[in-house]
Image (cartoon, grey):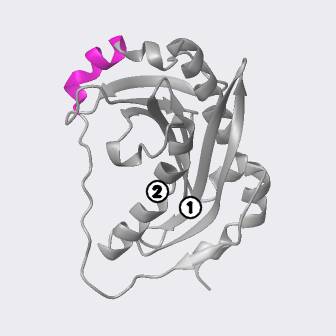
Amino acid sequence: MSRLYIFSLVALAALASTACAPRTTTRPAGPSASVVESPVSAASTTNASSAASATSTTPVGRYRFTRGELIRSTRNDSIYRFTDGTPATVSVIRYDVPENVKVGADPQAWTTPEGERFEEVQSILLQQGRIQSFEKAFSTTSDVVVDNAVLREHAIAIAVRPSGTTRMDYQYLYVVGGRFLKVRGTFPGDSWKNSDFPEFAREVARRTYRAAR
C-alpha cells in the first residue's frame, strides 16, 4: 500500500471543516507539459518590505514574518515568507488578477476558478515526472467575514509524494483590494495534523483587507 494513504484524510477534513471524496492520480502516458514558474529575486527584498503595507508583517499567531520579496518577472507581485518554527514552508503571495480569470462583474466570483488551478499544476508536475503521485484531500468554497464585508475563500489541500516522501500542500485564495491574495503552506510528513494553517490564512486575509481599505 502506498505511503500516501498513511495520511488520515478524515482528520484533515475535520481540520478544514469540510471534505470531499479523496481521489488518487497516477502518472498518465503522453507528452510532458510545461510549467512556467515565476522566479524570485532575493536582491529585491528591501523594495518588497517597503510594499508590505498591503500584507501584515507582524506575527500572526505563532507564525512569524521572515522576509518579503518582489517577484522578478512582474512589477507589482510580491511574496512574503513566514515560519511557525517547524520545517513547514509558509508563503503569502499578492498578485494581479489575470485577464482570463475576470469573468463577470463580481471580483469575489473569480476566486474559485483561480483556486482550482492548483490541482491542474499538480497534474503538470506529474506529467513532467517531478512528483510520483498526488491525492486531493479537499477543495471548498466558503465566505470569510471581515468587519462588514464578506470575502470569498477557496481552500484546497493536496497530499503530494515527490519521491518516496509525502507532504501536504495547502492553498487558501482570496480577492482583496482587486488583487489575489494566495496563502500557501507545505507541511512535510504528517505535521499538518498539528497545524493551525487555516486560521493563519484567514487572519492574513482579514489583516490584508483592513490594510487595503
Q: CA distance from mark 2 to mark 1?
A: 9 Å
Q: Position of residue 211 (x, y in %)?
A: 53, 13
Instruction: Work out whether residue 105 or residue 161 is closer to the camera in this orientation and state it.
Output: 105
**Quick check: marks 2 and 1 in contact, CB under 8 Å?**
yes
Query: Depth-wise, is mark 2 or mark 1 nearer the camera?
Result: 2
| Kind of residue at badge 1 | Ile
Neighbours of disc 2 within 10 Å: few (<14), some (14-19), many (20+): some
The extreme front residue here reads 105
How packed mark 1 is, by other alpha carbons closer than 10 Å (few <14, some 14-19, many 20 or more), is many
Q: Circle 2 is placed at which residue position? A: 118
Secondary structure beneath label 1: strand
Residue at horizontal 76%, vertical 55%? Answer: 18
Position of 90 compared to 192: left or right?
left
**In this view of the protein, can residue 88 be seen by the observer?**
no
Q: Quadrant of residue 148?
A: top right
Say if 54 sits above or below 187 in the image: above
Q: Residue at x 59, y 66 (%)?
A: 136
Between residue 189 and residue 117, name the one nearer to us. 117
Residue 125 in view, yes or no: yes
The answer to whether residue 210 is above or below residue 4 is: above
Which residues are the magenta region? 41-50
Q: Is residue 197 left or right of residue 40?
A: right
Q: Quadrant of the C terminus?
A: top right
Q: Which mark is residue 63?
A: none
Magenta-span inclusion, residue 44: yes
Give the residue number, with chain letter if any, for mark 1.
158
Closer to the chain start, of discs 2 and 1, is: 2
